[in-house]
Image (cartoon, rainbow, N blue to C red):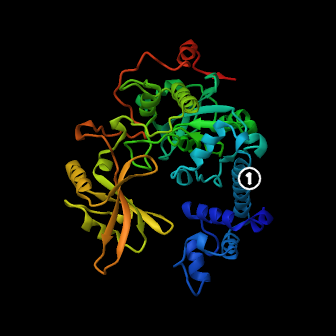
Amino acid sequence: MAKRLAAADKEVLVEVVRFTQKNGLKGSDGGWKDFLSRNDKKFGDSVSDPRKRSRDVLLAFLQTFSKDFQKYFGKLVKRQKERSAVQQYMNDFPDKVSPEQKLVQMTAEHPEYRKNYCFPSYQEGWKVLRIGEVSSLVSSSAMLAIDCEMVLCDDGMEAVVRVCVVDNNLEVKLDILVNPSKAITDYRTHITGVSKKDLEGVTSSLVDVQKSLKRILSKGKILIGQSLYRDLCALKIDYSQVIDTAYIFKYANLPTTASASLNSLCKSVLGYSVREEGEPHNCLKDAEAAMNLVLAKLKHGFNDPIEVAASSVTESDALKLLAHRIPMHLPCQELCKVFSGNPSIDDKIDSRIRGEFYSTCISFNEIDEVEKAFEALDGQMTKDSGGRLQKYVLMKRDNGDVVSFYVRKMVYGCQPNQFEFPKKRPQPTEDAEPKKEQADGDQQKKKRKSRKHVN
């Protein structure tokens, strides 16, 4: 594994170093910035972007970790090489790439993917699953959709208590209750639908579920889920052949980095709700809904931005404007000059850096203020990559320099009285009447009477 790390390309080493940064990992010389401060007498940690450092410096830092960590880094190198090989194959042989695999790629290209799918799989209990041979992988169309329900345990952590998996035909491949093997403080029955009584006599463990998933995901099958990284994190499974249904649609009335709830997506894309107001989550229905969303995407495209239910939008987002592609040399507080009203910027919370530019949010006290500030802003109206209206703004600084950036609303088409505050669980339940015209798979749903089923 040490040899694999030593032979890795710079681009791969950059990703491994970023992994250590995200997870706060430290070698014998501390973390990445600590290492630079101690070993680079000229620049110190002033140039901390791994991309701007030489391959030798990146490798030297990674070699300060223990042998066990270097072994794990070797696995990351192998994973990165597999991803690069898949991308290269897709570029060289686009006609051989399945539509399903293109959705895997779309998920991986989402701006939130790198942050959310960077798992701490070096920790005890995690399983890293292989994705198989590249040539067979990119043409694969076999898919499985998963959903999990979690309870809160006395150690403050969540634990899986139910796991459901369905295939392309909505046939149940796994439906199992899981014993967390530690004290549960909150069953969240009103959300999970699982009670203390349901777990009486249950002996299946998380390890049993991991073994089952490893078996049914063999040969690079694609795993589908809504905000799937949450399920994978709870299951302690690191797997990269994934389609996240929250990432494969563009939203006309949500921030770029936001995602709609499963219920909102189903109402907008499929025309029906997964559950009624106040009804607990049904693990099996949610897995089926995720599969139906992907099947609808494959069949109908949905390439244009869609509008989702207003209750998917938080009130705080409605009180902001997004400024992006701002040159790094422009202090964010200077942006306030170009907006009417009483804007404010919390750069510690809202700023995101991408290369030579950054983005930040300008906050207001009232929604009307946001509307007026955007309308009064002097700039050329354009559209962003998601089809949302934005303005191209030129700003003259006090020193005479002219800088440019873009500004758009965080939310479109929402009124103040439409907001509903989300509950604790990331996917809130919306108020809507289920429609009669369900997807073809709905007739199959009604035929299932068994709660526990394992193929």
Q: Nearer the viewer, residue 307 or 364?
A: 307
Q: Nearer the viewer, residue 317 or 155?
A: 317
Please tell me which residue is depicted at 46% across the width and 50% down the height of the picture. 385
Q: Which residue is mark 1?
A: 85
Relative to residue 307, is residue 404 depicted above or below? below
- Residue, far bottom: 42
Q: Is residue 66 left or right of residue 435?
A: right
Relative to residue 72, is residue 258 depicted above or below? above
Quarter of the rendering containing residue 50: bottom right
Relative to residue 141, is residue 110 depicted above or below? below
- Residue 31 visible in this rendered orientation of the protein: no
Please tell me which residue is depicted at 61% across the width and 23% down the height of the picture. 170
Please tell me which residue is depicted at 20% across the width and 61% down the height of the picture. 342
Q: Nearer the viewer, residue 371 or 76?
A: 371
- Residue, far front: 380
The quadrant of the picture occupied by the C terminus is: top right
Disc 1 residue type? Ala
Q: Nearer the viewer, residue 314 or 292?
A: 292
Quarter of the rendering containing residue 417: top left
Quarter of the rendering containing residue 244: top right
- Residue 106 visible in this rendered orientation of the protein: yes
Residue 451: x and y in percent read: 57, 19
Residue 186: x and y in percent read: 44, 36
Structural crowding at the residue carrying mark 1, measured as other residues with C-alpha within 10 Å and reported as few (<14), some (14–19) or many (≥20): some
